[in-house]
Image (cartoon, rainbow, N blue to C red):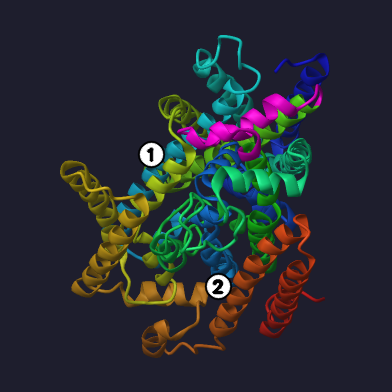
Amino acid sequence: MVLTALDYIIIAAYIILVLAVGLYFRKRASKSLTDYFISGRSLPWWILGTSMVATTFAADTPLAVTNLTAQGGLAQNWLWWNMAIGGMITVFVYARLWRRSGVVTDVELIEKRYSGKPASLLRGFRAIYLALPVNCIIIGWVAGAMLTILNNTVLHGTGYEGRLDWWIIVALLVIAGTYTTLSGLWGVATTDVLQFCIAMGACIVLAVIAVGDAGGIVAMRESVDEAMGPGGFRFFPDFANGNVAQLGLNLFLIYIFVQWWASWYPGAEPGGGGYVVQRMASAKDERHALLGTLWFQVAHYCVRPWPWLLVAFAAIAKYPELMDETNRGVGFAWIMRDLLPPGLIGLLLIAFFAAFMSTLASQTTWGASLLVNDVYKRFINPEADGRKLANAGRVATLIMLTAGGLTAYAMRHIAVDEAWRILLALGAGTGAVFMLRWFWWRINAWSEITAMVSAGVYYVLFTIYARVTGWELVEEYKLFYVAILTTLSWITVTFLTQPERQEVLESFLRTVRPGGPGWRTVATKAGIEPGESRLGLSLTCAALGIALVYLTLPGVGFVIFGEWVKALACLGGAAACAAAIALLLNRMGWEKILR
C-alpha cells in the first residue's frame, strides 16, 4: 500500500482541522473546572450522544469485531451485544439520577452517597485506580489496534513493520493530546461529532468495496459458509451446530443473564459510569441527558456495527487463511491494504485515526477529571479556584497521555477481544452494587470497597488455580464464578457493618429523588413525602428499549441481505417499541419527547 499526494493532503487537512478546534475552544475551557471537564453543563443531546458513540468507535473495535466474527460467526458478537441490556437501563433509570446528583465525575458520587473515612478512602482509591491502571489499559489496547492497522497497511512490505511502534505512539499521542489539553470537553465533544461522521462514512465505503470484491452479498455468503460452515450468519447462535460458527449455550446464558449487570466495563458500566457519566453531567438538563444517552445506545448497537461486520465477512471470504490466524482481526486491515484506491487510503486512515483520537481524548479527559476533581481538589488543594483547577486539568491530561503511551507500547501485541474479556472478568460482581446503591438505603461504603477488593482477589485466585492445575477456564466462566462470589461477599459485609448516617441518607434522597421501595425506611423516619415513583414506568421503557435494539440490529442485517419479510417484521416491531417509549416518557412528565 503506497500513499499518494492526495492521501497526504487529506491526512494533513484533518490534523490541521482538529488542532484548530482545540485552539478555538481554548478560552472557553479555561474558565473553570466544570467548563474544562463537563463543558459548563450546556451540551445538547445530539452532541453528547454522538460524542459517546465516537468514543466507543475506537481503532480497536472493528478489529475486535472482525476477530470475534471469524472465531464464531455473527453470534459471537453477543460478547458485547449483551451490554445493550444494561445500557438501556442506564438510559431510562439512571441518566436523570446522575444529572440530578450534580457531580463532575462518577467517583464524586461516593461522598454524596456515603460518609466518613471509608467514603473518602474509597473515593481517592477508586479515582486513582480508574484514572491510571484501568484507563491506561484502555489507551493501551486502542493504541495497539492503531499500530496493527498501520503495520498491516502503509508499513506492510516496507521492512519497518513493528520497528516504528514507539515513534508512532508518540506522534499519535502528541496530536491527540494537543487539542485535548487545550480545549477540554468542549473541543473533545465537538471534534467527536466530526470524527464520527468521517469514521462512519469511510467504513461504509470500505464495506461496499469489500462486498463488491467478494462478488456481492450472495457470493460472499456462500464463500463464508464454505470457510466456516453453515451458521455464520445467524443472529442467535445455533447451539446444536457443530461447526466453527458456534457459541455454547452456557456462554450465551452468561452473556444474557450475568455479564451485563455483573461487570464494570468502559462505556457499558452498570448504572452508568466513566465518560458516560461525564457526558450526562455535561447535558443541559435531565431531558438532554436521557435523549443523548438513548441516541448513544441506538447508534452504538444498531447503526455502527454493520459496516464492520460486512468487512469481517468479506475478509473471511477473501482470505481463507484468516481462520488459522491467532489474531484474526488483521483481516480488516488486509481489506484496506488490498482493495483501497488512492485517496480512499488516506480517508480510511483518517477514519481510524479519528476513531482512535476520539477514544483517546475522552479517556484522557475523563482520567484527568478524576485526578483533578477527586484527588487534587478533594485531598491536596480544596481552595483552588476555577482557573487553577483548569490548569491542573491540563497537567493531569499530560500525565494520562504519558502513562497511556508507556502502557500502549507494552500492550501492543495483545489481541483486543482478549483485553476486553480480562477487563470484564476483573470487575465481575461490582456492577450489582453500583446499580443498587441508588435504590437501597442499606448499602454503605464498605459494600463498594468489598466488591472492588473481592473481585480482584477472586479473579487472581481463579487465574492462579487454573494455571497450577491446568484447568482450562475461559474468561466468561471465570467472570461467572467471580461475579457470584463477589456479590455474596459484598452483601454479607453490608449486613455486618453499620448503615450510613441518617442525615447523609436524607440528603441523598432529597437531592436525587430515586424513588422505589428501597428508600421507604429512610423517607418514613425523616418525614419525607415519597412522591410519585416512576421506577416501574422507567423499567418498562428500558425493556422496550432493549427490544428496540434487538429488533433493529438484525432488522438492518435482513435489509442488507435482502430478506424483506424478516426485515419488515423486525423493523416494524422496533418502530412500535420506539412509539411506545415516546408515549410513556410523555406520561412520566419529565421528558416531553413529543412536544
**What mark, if any, has residue 260 been given in the picture?**
none
Quarter of the image for residue 360 reads top right
**Amino acid beneath label 2:** Val
Labels 2 & 1 near each other (Cβ < 8 A):
no
The residue positioned 46% from the left and 77% from the top of the image is 509
Taken as a whole, is the magenta stretch helix, strand or loop? helix
Camera sees residue 386 = no
Nearer the observer, 36 or 460: 460
The amino acid type found where label 1 is placed reads Pro
Closer-to-camera residue (284/391): 284
In the rendered structure, which segment of residues is drawn in magenta? 316-343
Which residue in the protein does label 1 denote? Answer: 133
| Position of 365 relative to 281 (above/below) | above
- As helix, strand or loop, the secondary structure at mark 1 comes to helix
Residue 410 in view (yes/no): yes
Q: Which mark is residue 93?
A: 2
Q: Residues within 10 Å of mark 1 (few under 14, many from 20)?
A: few
| Precedes in sequence: disc 2 or disc 1 | 2
Quadrant where the N terminus sits is top right
- In the rendered image, residue 59, in percent from the top left (x then y), is placed at 60, 36
Asked if the stretch drawn in magenta spans residue 137, the answer is no
> Residue at point 51% right, 62% down?
238
